[in-house]
Image (cartoon, rainbow, N blue to C red):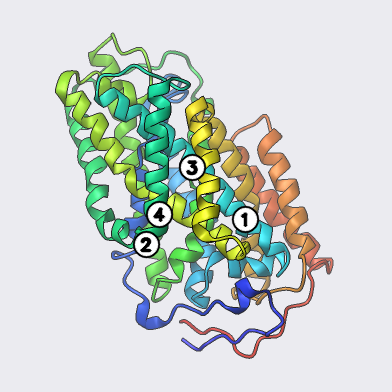
């Protein structure tokens, strides 16, 4: 891959970044696929996926919705970012300087990615704390002293590892991913006998179908934009495609489908299970088995927790280099821990909505920018690219306030269409001159 030489007048976060060389790239089954699969194996993804879905529609339709959600996540949210990463070898915060400008890139996607990672860290801390307490037989919930102590210990330890020892977590991630996969399979085989007995409580098939689309894509939105960072480790377009098809499209069906079927089967076999959460199915296993599973799911949450802290810290230290990485990470994590302790991080559906509304239009604008630039990265644009900012603002508004689902898709298309229209109208600033361009193909 040819080197990229940036104009010396560019911001430091762009000027000091060098492309990932071809020698550091690897096949899709080594990096992209297992990394993305690990995202969906995180219990946060499927913990509440059966709520508002299998109680309103048949299981076949719900599985079909997962297939479509996987295809849309791959095709709309991941593919273009993945190709941009592969072609340039550059990370998201540099590539995004085309869509949002060299100055605008500080906020989007730069700092925004870090802030949303803290949201995910809060959700992960809440879930892990809940499971650890359940594993030891405690019923303490948010706001209690026990919950606070465990949340504080979990949060700060994971954050410290994310800053100082992420390389060790990365090496152990494949093993840690196997833990939830094996438990998902175990629960599925234990409950599969009741799957055929499942019946929806009410008839709202379309509502259930759209809820699954909104939930899955909303969960995936930030990871889709981060496809740039995954793509910079891909050797060619085939790696981008295969990594996404297996690690995203297929993983969504497996990691989402098996838990949905398990909840349906468990409820049919055991009428005492009144909740539609996966947590309720785990608890119904009873005794030491349930305790062990709660603890193992918490252990499996180490990887996403550390990576959330790592990405947040990377965002803050890159965009605000004057603040030490450890200091900015711990400050952000403190806010996340408070959100977990108070229970504010418990509403997963609302988290998915916020994430989808935030990154849906970012992905849409990036897709428009990519195709308008002839399927290439145009290079950083001077100052603030108002085409990107207006596209994001309108898309975010639609994603947050639309009463119809899946709002995350509407926000994506608003971002795409508005960016394309404003770019055609001449609202894009000039590209900053660079001496050479990447040719990573």
Disc 1 vs disc 4: Cβ atoms closer than 8 Å?
Answer: no
The x, y position of residue 375, in whole percent, is 59, 73
Which of the two marks, 2 or 1, is nearer to us in this view?
1
If you read the primary sequence from the N terminus, does the residue marked by circle 2 or circle 1 appear first? Answer: 2
Tag shown at residue 162: 4
Crowding around mark 4 (Cα neighbors within 10 Å: few <14, some 14 to 19, many 20+) is many
Q: Quadrant of residue 405?
A: top right
Of residues 36 and 258, the one nearer the viewer is 36
**Distance from the alpha carbon under mark 2 to that under mark 4:** 20 Å
| Mark 2, residue position | 32
Crowding around mark 2 (Cα neighbors within 10 Å: few <14, some 14 to 19, many 20+) is many
Task: Left or right? Give the position of 30 relative to 86.
Answer: left
As helix, strand or loop, the secondary structure at mark 4 comes to helix
As helix, strand or loop, the secondary structure at mark 2 comes to helix
Q: Give the answer, above or below, for where 13 lies relative to 162.
A: below
If you read the primary sequence from the N terminus, does the residue marked by circle 3 or circle 1 appear first? Answer: 1
Residue shown at 29%/65% (left/top)?
Answer: 30
If you read the primary sequence from the N terminus, does the residue marked by circle 3 or circle 2 appear first? Answer: 2
| Mark 1, residue position | 111
Disc 2 vs disc 4: Cβ atoms closer than 8 Å?
Answer: no
**Distance from the alpha carbon under mark 3 to that under mark 2:** 20 Å
Which of the two marks, 4 or 3, is nearer to us in this view?
4
| Mark 3, residue position | 120
As helix, strand or loop, the secondary structure at mark 3 comes to helix
Q: Quadrant of residue 98?
A: bottom right
Residue 398 seen in the current view: yes
Which of the two marks, 1 or 4, is nearer to us in this view?
4
If you read the primary sequence from the N terminus, does the residue marked by circle 4 or circle 3 appear first? Answer: 3
**Distance from the alpha carbon under mark 2 to that under mark 1:** 24 Å
The x, y position of residue 45, in whole percent, is 41, 38
Tag shown at residue 44: none
């Amino acid at each position: 891959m040819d080197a990229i030489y940036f104009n010396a007048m560019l911001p430091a976060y762009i000027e000091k970044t060098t492309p990932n060389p071809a020698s550091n790239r690897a096949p899709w089954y080594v990096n992209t696929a297992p990394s993305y699969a690990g995202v969906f194996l995180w219990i946060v993804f499927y913990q509440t996926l059966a709520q508002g879905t299998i109680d309103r529609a048949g299981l076949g339709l719900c599985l079909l919705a997962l297939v479509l959600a996987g295809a849309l996540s791959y095709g709309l949210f991941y593919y273009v970012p993945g190709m941009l990463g592969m072609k340039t070898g550059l990370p998201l915060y540099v590539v995004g300087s085309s869509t949002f400008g060299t100055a605008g890139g500080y906020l989007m996607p730069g700092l925004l990615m870090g802030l949303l990672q803290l949201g995910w860290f809060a959700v992960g801390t809440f879930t892990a704390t809940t499971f650890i307490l359940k594993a030891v037989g405690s019923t303490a919930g948010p706001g209690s002293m026990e919950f606070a102590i465990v949340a504080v210990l979990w949060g700060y330890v994971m954050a410290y590892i994310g800053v100082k020892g992420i390389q060790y977590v990365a090496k152990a991630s494949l093993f840690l991913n196997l833990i939830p996969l094996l438990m998902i399979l175990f629960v599925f085989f234990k409950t599969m006998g009741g799957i055929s007995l499942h019946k929806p409580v009410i008839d709202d098939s379309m509502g259930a179908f759209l809820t699954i689309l909104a939930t899955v894509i909303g969960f995936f939105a930030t990871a889709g934009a981060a496809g740039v960072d995954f793509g910079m480790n891909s050797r060619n377009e085939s790696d981008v495609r295969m990594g996404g098809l297996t690690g995203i499209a297929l993983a969504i069906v497996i990691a989402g489908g098996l838990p949905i079927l398990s909840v349906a089967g468990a409820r049919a076999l055991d009428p005492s299970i009144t909740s539609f959460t996966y947590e309720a199915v785990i608890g119904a296993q009873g005794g030491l088995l349930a305790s062990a599973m709660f603890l193992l799911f918490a252990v499996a949450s180490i990887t996403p927790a550390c990576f959330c802290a790592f990405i947040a810290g990377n965002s803050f230290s890159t965009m605000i280099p004057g603040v030490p990485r450890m200091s900015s990470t711990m400050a952000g994590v403190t806010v996340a821990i408070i959100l977990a302790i108070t229970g504010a991080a418990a509403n997963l559906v609302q988290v998915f909505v916020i994430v989808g509304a935030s990154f849906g239009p970012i992905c849409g604008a990036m897709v428009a920018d990519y195709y308008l630039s002839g399927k290439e990265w145009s290079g950083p644009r001077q100052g603030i690219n108002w085409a990107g900012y207006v596209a994001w603002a309108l898309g975010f508004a639609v994603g947050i306030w639309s009463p119809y689902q899946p709002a995350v898709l509407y926000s994506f298309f608003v971002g795409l269409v508005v960016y394309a229209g404003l770019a055609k109208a001449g609202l894009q600033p000039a590209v900053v001159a660079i001496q050479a361009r990447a040719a990573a193909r």
